[in-house]
Image (cartoon, rainbow, N blue to C red):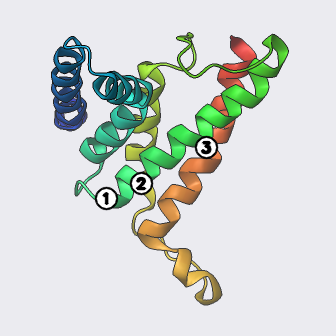
Amino acid sequence: MDVLKRFAIGAVYPIVALIIIGIFWLAMQTGMNAMESIYNGLILMFPLIVSMGIAIGMSKDQSGAAALAGAVGWLVYGAVIVSLNYPKNGVFTPTEFSANFNFFSGIYMGITAGVLYNKFYNIRLPEWLAFFGGRRFVPIVTSVVALFIGAFVAAIF
């Protein structure tokens, strides 16, 4: 039950972002081009927002390092998906909605980052690597895991 509670806490952040997106959608209906650009940018980056929000909620202490890990994880995942899938089809268009590059990717990368944060936030490394220990280690390990998740998803779809 604790995991579900943490997920719900993390889901609040993307819901707030959806409200903001809705406000810009309403403003876009007035015909202002700037509002349409802002709306499209928010829609494009919504999986990133989801990943960061879920990572914050899933972490033990709602740390910013978890949000950074969620962002880094989703960006690495997206880069792997694009590099492995889209050169076959031609040019990548970021507004394209596909099965492996949508807000569900933000959810599972956020969960991954949150779980990895809880596991590695207090890790001790040797003295010569101590700078990269603790919370700084979490985005590093999340990027490596996201690399493998992205390769796995790209191979399936």
- Residue placed under numbered mark 1 in the picture: 64
Q: Residue at 61% of width from left, 43% of height from top?
A: 145
Q: Residues within 10 Å of mark 2 (few under 14, many from 20)?
A: many
Q: If you read the primary sequence from the N terminus, does the residue marked by circle 3 or circle 2 appear first?
A: 2
Q: Amino acid at mark 1?
A: Gly
In the picture, the disc for residue 145 is: 3
Marks 3, 2: nearer the viewer? 2
Q: If you read the primary sequence from the N terminus, does the residue marked by circle 3 or circle 1 appear first?
A: 1
Q: Is residue 116 visible?
A: no
Q: From mark 2 to mark 1, how far is it between C-alphas?
A: 6 Å
Asked whether the beta carbons under mark 2 and mark 1 sit within 8 Å of each other, the answer is yes
Marks 3, 1: nearer the viewer? 1
Q: Residues within 10 Å of mark 1 (few under 14, many from 20)?
A: some
- State the count of labels: 3
In the picture, the disc for residue 68 is: 2
94, 113: nearer the viewer = 94
